[in-house]
Image (cartoon, helix red, strand yellow):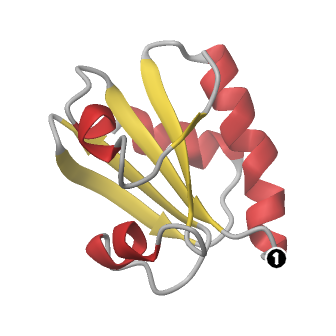
Amino acid sequence: MSVSIVNKNNFEQVKSSGKTVLLDFYADWCGPCRMVSPLVDQIAEENPQYLVGKVNVDNEPELAQAFGVASIPTLVVMKNGKVVNHSVGARPKPQILAMLEG
């Protein structure tokens, strides 16, 4: 499964997915975001049971604000439309997977 680009137009569809959702809030200019991005891509490819999406905070400030994103990268895990876990800053792949499984 590939990574979805999430924006305000498709967010409700992503949120209402029956799958556990991982959202990566990032910006193209953010160094730590560029470190996390390939890990998020790998998780999406290796774990089709999750819906993985990326939110560019420069393009989607309303979504970033709705999630209280003050620093990036911010990773948010949602189940049944509710936030169940989140982290700020670069994380290694095992920690990101643990967020999804926890």
**Image-quadrant location for residue 8:** bottom left
Left or right: 36, with 81 as reference point: right
Left or right: 17, with 55 as reference point: left
Residue plotted at (26% across, 25% down):
17
Residue 9: percent from left, percent from top: 36, 47
Left or right: 75, with 81 as reference point: right
Q: Residue furthest bottom?
A: 70
Label 1 secondary element: loop
Q: What residue did someone put label 1 on?
A: 29
Residue plotted at (28% across, 33% down):
13
Could you say which is closer to the camera, residue 55 or residue 40?
Answer: 55
Residue 56: percent from left, percent from top: 60, 63
Residue 98: percent from left, percent from top: 48, 40
Left or right: 57, with 7 as reference point: right
Could you say which is closer to the camera, residue 43 or residue 92?
Answer: 43
Q: Amino acid at mark 1?
A: Trp
**Image-quadrant location for residue 16:** top left
Reply above or below: 9 against 71. above
